[in-house]
Image: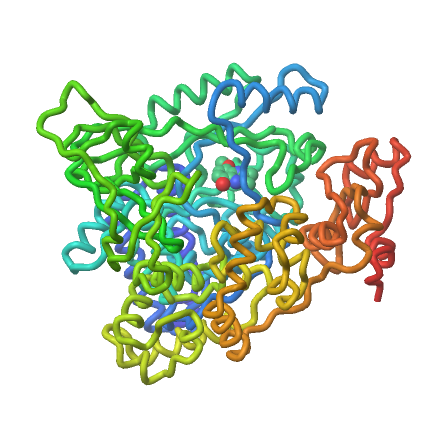
């Protein structure tokens, strides 16, 4: 065979293999036995070995890259990846349907109906039909570049099929693991004496975020597409179901249970039908998703905060099972709160084996009259911690009453219950190793300083080997100290130092959140950052000033005030600043009042920033941003291809301004 002939055969083989993948993953209708597929694959591998000049990155042999990454790059989503609003009962579904019918002025809305897989949302971009980049959802605006990992998922095509494929296609969908895949993976993990995954979702998440994509390739991941982000193509997308059909035609798998339903009653029928089949599906779902099928209508409906107004996830009720409560143990949290945890005889709830469940606090134990040895109902909903629902009193035999300890089971300090609070707390503060560990875990966590790779196990190792005693010590770590730790090595030590270094440049709100002040979550940290803008101002704030900030009441104000009164905390903060932790000044300028009370609508594609960025700027200026035009809209800012919102604004005589005029208005023109 000469090169010309080899090239022809290689093309033939690639087309055949892609077609068989399509038959298998998209149509669920394989036309050749596995052995024949394997034979085609090995013939292709052999030819590419013989003629390396014929190797192409989109060849089905090239799914797995060779080199591990040192970190995931950030990817900015041009169209934000939003979340979905939820409905938990028929009334909430009725309200959703009513809102839509009223806004659209129609009695019967046509919806698409899909299963809601319990996986991870990803975005995959195809340019000229070739897989170009894939990213996680991240915070909705910025995700992580997981292209190499997604390429290893067999059901994700590396090249699109068909003739009318788009110039640019951003597919959105869910990466997940089937029940079967999950069982096989955990069996292998057990054999290798490696950590077992708690459920298919965690297994899928852990598998997808591997810096070494060769590991991802060994994990049984699947993918179903559920929508489109950015799109440039000849075929005009008019309906959601039509879009899904097109995706299938282009070789992308779509959940087979997808269908079109007319009106609310048909939604209820679909929900019931899928609910009955739920336990027989190959993968875990936690509800169904309804979307307005007509894309123009979707556009008209717009968005509310972070979710489309035209879609909803109708969740299934949590699944319950019966098991025996073997013991009650105490966990000590970051703020010293003692949480009683039920140790259970292992029981499968919706396909996942449960051995622990939260009992919340002593009041809950008393209210439910839970005793050690009781038979209990356990409930698990989605990814939340399982809980003990109720006791089966009729089955009660010999049981022991639970008592809250008067000393912390970890450090021996006194345990107190503060008046008006349900929780008991260890008074040991950071001298309690449990609280100390949890506070460092919190500091390093994704939403705080986001120190990649610094998880619970490593933190415990660092504390036990006396390298770290508090969060400021993290930034003093040396390469040789890290590299000498068990299961570490040079490369991992380097990665941790890099991650620490990266975390030095953060935002003020993340820093405040990372400090772990009691009851200061992300939202409160953001309000504090916006209000004070500078650390010194926050540090010296009196409780009265803190209470003037919306959402901060007397208890939280007191927590913040007393946090900054502790000499120990101030020392740690100073050491963190000395370690060159920095953030940019808050982008809230003095114009805040000028824009307060104004409402903006953004439409079309903006050139100098994404709509999400424009929205953030407006929010920082104190303005409101709405997804739809109404009489209350102050301005409509439009970019390219503005759509029906522009027409509506013009009809209502609402000022419409270009992106440039908008930039000028907020003082950012070039
Ligand atoms: O998280 C999601 C799961 C399933 C979705 C979704 C979906 O459709 C079946 N659809 C949208 C539009 C979004 N999230 C934002």
Q: Nearer the viewer, residue 335 or 485?
A: 335
Q: Is residue 161 in view from this perspective?
A: yes
Q: Nearer the viewer, residue 605 or 422?
A: 422
Q: How is the image coloured?
A: rainbow
- Residue lying farthest bottom? 480
**As drawn, 582 above or below 155:** below
Instruction: Give the side of residue 230 with respect to residue 411, left or right.
Output: right
x, y percent for residue 481: 32, 82
* Quadrant (top left, top right, bottom left, bottom right) of the C terminus: bottom right
**As drawn, 205 above or below 385:** below
When asked about the image quadrant of residue 668, the answer is bottom right
x, y percent for residue 475: 44, 77
x, y percent for residue 50: 33, 73
Q: Residue at x 44, y 51 (%)?
A: 157
Instruction: Give the side of residue 515 with respect to residue 432, left or right.
Output: right
Instruction: Give the side of residue 108 with respect to residue 670, left or right.
Output: left
- Residue lying farthest left? 398
Q: Residue at x 78, y 35 (%)?
A: 629
When asked about the image quadrant of residue 377, the answer is top left
Q: Nearer the viewer, residue 417 or 24?
A: 417
* Quadrant (top left, top right, bottom left, bottom right) of the N terminus: bottom left
Q: Is residue 20 in view from this perspective?
A: no
Number of numbered discs present? 0
x, y percent for residue 83: 54, 42
Q: Residue at x 44, y 38 (%)?
A: 420
């Amino acid at each position: 065979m000469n090169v010309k002939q080899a090239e022809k055969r290689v093309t033939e083989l690639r087309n055949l293999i892609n077609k068989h993948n399509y038959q298998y993953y998209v149509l669920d209708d394989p036309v050749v036995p596995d052995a024949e597929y394997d034979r085609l694959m090995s013939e292709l591998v052999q030819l590419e070995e013989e003629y390396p000049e014929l190797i192409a990155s989109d060849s089905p042999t090239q799914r797995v890259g060779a080199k591990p990454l040192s970190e995931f790059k950030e990817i900015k989503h041009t169209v934000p990846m939003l979340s979905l609003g939820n409905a938990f009962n028929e009334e909430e579904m009725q309200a959703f349907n009513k809102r839509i019918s009223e806004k659209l002025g129609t009695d019967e809305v046509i919806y698409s109906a899909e299963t809601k897989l319990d996986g991870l949302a990803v975005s995959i971009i195809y340019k000229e039909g070739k897989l170009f980049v894939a990213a996680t959802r991240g915070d909705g605006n910025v995700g992580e570049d997981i292209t190499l990992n997604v390429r290893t998922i067999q059901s994700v095509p590396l090249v699109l099929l068909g003739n009318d494929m788009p110039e640019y296609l951003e597919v959105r969908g869910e990466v997940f693991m089937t029940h079967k895949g999950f069982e096989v993976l955990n069996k292998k993990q057990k054999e290798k004496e490696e950590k077992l995954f708690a459920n298919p979702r965690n297994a899928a998440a852990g598998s997808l975020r591997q810096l070494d994509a060769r590991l991802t390739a060994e994990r049984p991941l699947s993918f179903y597409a559920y929508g489109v982000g950015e799109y440039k193509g000849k075929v005009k997308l008019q309906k959601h179901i039509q879009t899904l059909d097109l995706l299938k035609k282009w070789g992308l798998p779509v959940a087979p249970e997808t269908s079109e339903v007319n009106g609310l009653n048909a939604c209820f029928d679909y929900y019931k039908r899928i609910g009955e089949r739920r336990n027989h599906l190959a993968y875990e779902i936690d509800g169904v998703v309804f979307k307005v099928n007509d894309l123009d209508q979707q556009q008209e409906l717009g968005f509310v905060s972070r979710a489309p107004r035209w879609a909803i996830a109708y969740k299934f009720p949590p699944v319950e099972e019966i098991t025996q409560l073997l013991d009650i143990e105490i966990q000590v949290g970051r703020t010293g709160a003692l949480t009683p945890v039920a140790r259970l005889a292992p029981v499968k709830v919706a396909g996942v084996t449960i051995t622990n469940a939260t009992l919340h606090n002593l009041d809950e134990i008393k209210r439910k009259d839970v005793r050690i040895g009781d038979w209990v109902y356990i409930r698990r909903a989605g990814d939340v911690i399982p809980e003990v629902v109720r006791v089966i009193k009729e089955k009660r035999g010999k049981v022991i009453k639970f008592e809250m300890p008067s000393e912390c089971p970890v450090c021996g300090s006194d345990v107190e219950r503060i008046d008006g609070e349900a929780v008991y707390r260890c008074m040991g503060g950071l001298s309690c190793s449990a609280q100390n560990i949890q506070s460092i875990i919190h500091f390093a966590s994704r939403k705080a300083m986001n120190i990649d790779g610094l998880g619970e196990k490593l933190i415990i190792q660092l504390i036990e080997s006396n390298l770290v005693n508090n969060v400021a010590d993290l930034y003093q770590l040396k390469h040789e100290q890290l590299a000498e730790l068990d299961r570490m090595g040079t490369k991992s030590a380097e990665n941790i130092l890099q991650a620490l270094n990266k975390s030095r440049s953060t935002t003020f709100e993340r820093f405040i959140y990372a400090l772990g002040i009691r009851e200061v979550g992300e939202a409160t940290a953001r309000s504090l950052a916006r209000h004070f803008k500078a650390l010194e101002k926050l540090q010296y704030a009196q409780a009265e000033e803190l209470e003037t900030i919306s959402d901060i009441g007397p208890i939280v104000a007191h927590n913040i005030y007393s946090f900054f009164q502790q000499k120990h905390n101030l020392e740690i903060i100073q050491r963190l600043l000395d370690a060159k932790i920095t953030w940019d000044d808050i982008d809230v300028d003095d114009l805040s009042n000028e824009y307060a009370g104004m409402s903006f609508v953004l439409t079309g594609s903006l050139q100098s920033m994404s709509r999400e960025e424009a929205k953030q700027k407006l929010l920082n200026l104190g303005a409101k941003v709405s997804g739809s035009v109404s009489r209350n809209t102050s301005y409509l800012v439009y970019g390219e291809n503005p759509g029906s919102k522009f027409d509506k604004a013009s009809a209502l005589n609402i000022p419409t301004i270009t992106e440039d005029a908008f930039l000028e208005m907020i003082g950012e023109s070039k």
